[in-house]
Image: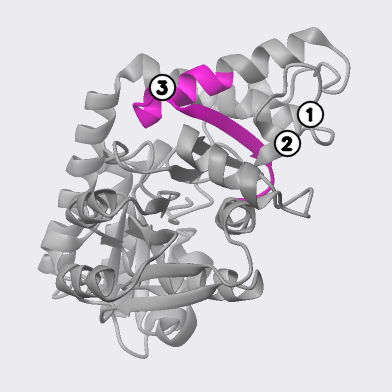
């Protein structure tokens, strides 16, 4: 059983839909209609009237494309971070010639709102980046206060919501480029990036005029006649089916299901003497990261080999210190959480 925080297990209906004969995405009108339908469904999930695009490429493509499409050499960018992917935005900014200013916090701490306020008073920034759910540490950030500050200062905003979209509400009102991906709470196979793009972001991208094709949002603004390159027809069909499952259940019900699964996971963890990283009040409904210093990788291997339960260790410097249970999308079920935690209890006792 795969209980990882992405890629997630894929429901049978989605797998079956992906195996059907596919229209040619370059020339057949039926594929264009399907793509448009997927974008309309995504607008409902995002809760927006902004344009939504679906690009062929794993979720990290969206993070880079958002920067490549908006950041010109010399642009001042505010990177607000308390995790690995928040830090990574600054690397993307530098790679495209921008000048990042990082307002950082410890990985166990919330975003530094006062630091953002001080930075905005001290300088002028074209845009700002942040992460809603930091998957490596299981952190759900309260980004609304930061977004409101940035809106007051007229700063364009880019948010990585890859691991939260479809599993918990994303405050999209003040987000100019809101990024998601197929392989997380949507429970579709990896391979597609989604983005809700505001009119203001399109204007900035048009002025920037990126010199890349693949890491460029602009060619996706109007796909009525053709796509920038051959689209991933089977992946789009799979995402279409996964979105139908989600919307048929109802977003409110989906979010409640994720909360129940997360609560159960942390209750079971507490029974085993495990602490979440970060504290439970800042842990995400889609993933729980347990703090197991120096033990995570060995436990992950034993769970997979002895119990056929696949969890994820941490990333970077925390690779052997964090064990992550993904209760997102198709796997946001109390029964599946119980099976995973039963196996973990056995391994911890051995």
Kindly report the distance in space between the C-alpha atoms of the residues bearing marks 1 and 2: 8 Å
Residue at the spot of label 3: 49
Distance between the Cα atoms at labels 3 and 2? 19 Å
**Over which residues does the magenta segment extend?**
38-58
6 to the left or right of 36: left
Quadrant where the C terminus lies?
A: bottom left
Q: Residue at x 62, y 16 (%)?
A: 36
Dot 3 alpha-carbon crowd within 10 angstroms: few under 14, some 14 to 19, many 20 or more: few
Q: Position of residue 97 (x, y in %)?
A: 63, 73
Position of 145 compared to 155: left or right? left
* Mark 2 residue element: helix
Q: Residue at x 47, y 38 (%)?
A: 200
Q: Are marks 1 and 2 in contact (CB under 8 Å)?
A: yes
In this orientation, which residue lies closer to the viewer: 77 or 47?
77
**Mark positioned earlier in the residue sequence (3 or 1):** 3
Q: Tell me the distance, in whole angstroms, between the alpha carbons under discs 3 and 1.
A: 22 Å
Q: Is mark 3 in CB contact (under 8 Å) with mark 2? A: no
Question: Within 10 Å of the Cα at label 1, are there few (<14), some (14-19), or many (20+) other Cα atoms?
Answer: some
Circle 1 — which element?
A: loop
Q: Residue furthest bottom?
A: 294
Left or right for 97, reference 84: right
325 vs 189: above or below = below
Mark 1 or 2: in front is: 2
Q: Circle 2 is placed at which residue position? A: 219
* Residue 227, disc: 1
Q: Which residue occupies 76% across, 27% down? A: 233
Image location (x, y in percent) of residue 272: 16, 71
């Amino acid at each position: 059983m795969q209980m990882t925080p992405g890629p997630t297990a894929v429901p049978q209906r989605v797998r079956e839909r992906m195996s059907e004969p596919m229209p040619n995405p370059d020339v057949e009108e039926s594929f264009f209609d399907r793509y448009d339908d997927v974008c309309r469904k995504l607008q409902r999930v995002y809760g927006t009237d902004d344009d939504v695009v679906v690009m062929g490429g794993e979720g990290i493509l969206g993070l880079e494309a958002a920067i490549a499409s908006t950041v010109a050499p010399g642009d001042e960018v505010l990177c607000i971070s308390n995790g690995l992917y928040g830090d990574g935005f600054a690397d993307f900014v530098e790679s495209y010639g921008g000048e990042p200013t990082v307002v950082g916090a410890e990985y166990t701490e919330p975003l530094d709102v006062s630091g953002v306020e001080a930075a905005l008073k001290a300088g002028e920034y074209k845009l700002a980046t942040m992460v809603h759910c930091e998957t490596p540490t299981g952190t759900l950030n309260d980004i609304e206060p930061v977004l409101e500050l940035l809106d007051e200062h007229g700063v364009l905003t880019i948010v990585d919501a890859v691991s939260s979209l479809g599993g918990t509400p994303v405050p999209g009102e003040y987000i100019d480029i809101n990024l998601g991906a197929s392989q997380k709470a949507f429970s579709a196979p990896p391979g597609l990036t989604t983005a809700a793009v505001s009119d203001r972001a399109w204007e900035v991208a048009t002025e920037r005029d990126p010199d890349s094709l693949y890491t460029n949002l602009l060619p996706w603004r109007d796909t009525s006649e053709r796509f920038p390159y051959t689209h991933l027809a089977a992946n789009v069909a799979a995402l279409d089916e996964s979105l139908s499952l989600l919307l048929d259940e109802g977003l409110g019900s989906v979010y409640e299901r994720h909360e129940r699964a997360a609560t159960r996971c942390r209750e079971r963890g507490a029974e085993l003497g495990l602490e979440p990283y970060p504290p439970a009040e800042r842990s995400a409904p889609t993933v729980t990261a347990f703090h197991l210093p120096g033990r995570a990788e060995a436990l992950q291997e034993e769970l997979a080999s002895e119990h056929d339960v696949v969890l994820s260790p941490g990333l970077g410097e925390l690779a052997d210190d964090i064990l992550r249970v993904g209760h997102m999308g198709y796997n946001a079920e109390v029964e599946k959480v119980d099976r995973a935690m039963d196996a973990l209890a056995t391994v911890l006792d051995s």
